[in-house]
Image: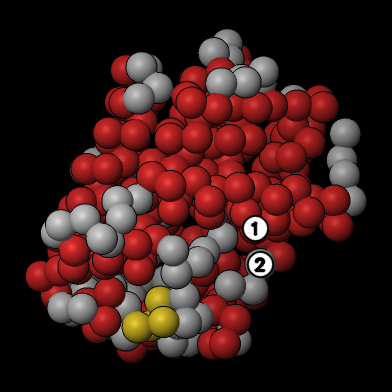
Amino acid sequence: MAVGIEEGIEYIDRKRQQIDILLDKYLPSEEIYPYALHKAMRYSVLAGGKRIRPILTMTAYESFGGIDETVINPAACALEFIHTYSLIHDDLPCMDDDDLRRGMPTLHKKFDEATAVLAGDALHDLAFGLVAQSGSAPAVKEMADAIGTFGMLGGQMADVEAEGKNVNLDQIKYIHTHKTGALIRASVRIGAILAGVDDARLATLSRYGEKIGFAFQIIDDILDIEGDQKKLGKEVGSDCKNNKATYPGTAGMEQAHRDADRLIDEAIAISMELGSKGTHFGSIARYIGQRES
């Protein structure tokens, strides 16, 4: 059953507010030593964000009957901590060398490079501690696989290697589905795994996660060219500046828009296969397709 755009946005906003409270709860206080490290962690995590990954985790868990907040809340926040750690490291001078993130100075600009590296590492560690609280080894493994050399880090490496080179669409798809898509797919799967879904539904949710994950990064590429810097909270044109391999740069802007729209439509169609349990997944897909930041 589909819901209206307004109802979908209301759901996402409500979940985002819930997650922001939880993130603050699970982060160490900056009044506890090492002060600078804890302050840096909090600076990056609490700077804002769409919180799509933990929203997906909670949605998958709750849609399939999960009710234990002590299981899902730490696991959902773990996904946001992993995402933030990846952004901190991605912004470093040795990677993308970005000055702004979410409308604020990047962590290495606000503090220094050493603190940024350590804050990212600390968030990575905190995330595994939280997801382990679920007591689910499959959930822990799912997150590890999404991060590792066959997931996010593998995509990041391919992204670095592609800088300044002519790449084809297969190479771009590899980068996008690993660097960005793997963690989004895992966010859906971890919530479903903790809810105890059967293999058939897990496979359906995995297909959904793959579609929105790929679309998410194509839209990121589009916004880096056509987006509003005030809404994005970061410099427009940074991909071009860094000679990044992008979807519009390889396929052209028209096809990039077309393919992103197609992937979102396919994700919505998959969500409808789940009946009433797929309602919020459809809303999240629509939100991703229409985002401006």
Mark 2 closeness class: few <14, some 14–19, many ≥20 residues within 10 Å: some
Residue 277 picture quarter: top right
Residue 78 picture quarter: top left
- Establish if 196 lies above or below 1: above
Q: Residue at x 77, y 56 (%)?
A: 9
SS at mark 1 in the image: helix
Of residues 221 and 137, the one nearer the viewer is 137
Residue 174 visible in this rendered orientation of the protein: no
In percent of width and height, residue 139 lies at: 38, 24
Q: Residue at x 32, y 78 (%)?
A: 106
Quarter of the figure that contains the N terminus: top right
Of residues 82 and 18, the one nearer the viewer is 18
Q: Residue at x 81, y 25 (%)?
A: 275
Residue 14 visible in this rendered orientation of the protein: yes
| Mark 2 vs 1: CB contact within 8 A | yes
Residue 234 picture quarter: bottom left
The disc placed on residue 291 is 2
Mark 1 closeness class: few <14, some 14–19, many ≥20 residues within 10 Å: some
- Establish if 232 lies above or below 288: below
Q: Amino acid at mark 2?
A: Arg
SS at mark 2 in the image: loop
Q: Amino acid at mark 1?
A: Ile
In percent of width and height, residue 180 lies at: 42, 54
In percent of width and height, residue 122 lies at: 20, 51
Q: CA distance from mark 2 to mark 1?
A: 5 Å
Q: Residue at x 57, y 66 (%)?
A: 219
In percent of width and height, residue 34 lies at: 14, 59
Quarter of the figure that contains the C terminus: bottom right
Q: What residue does disc 1 label? A: 288
The disc placed on residue 167 is none
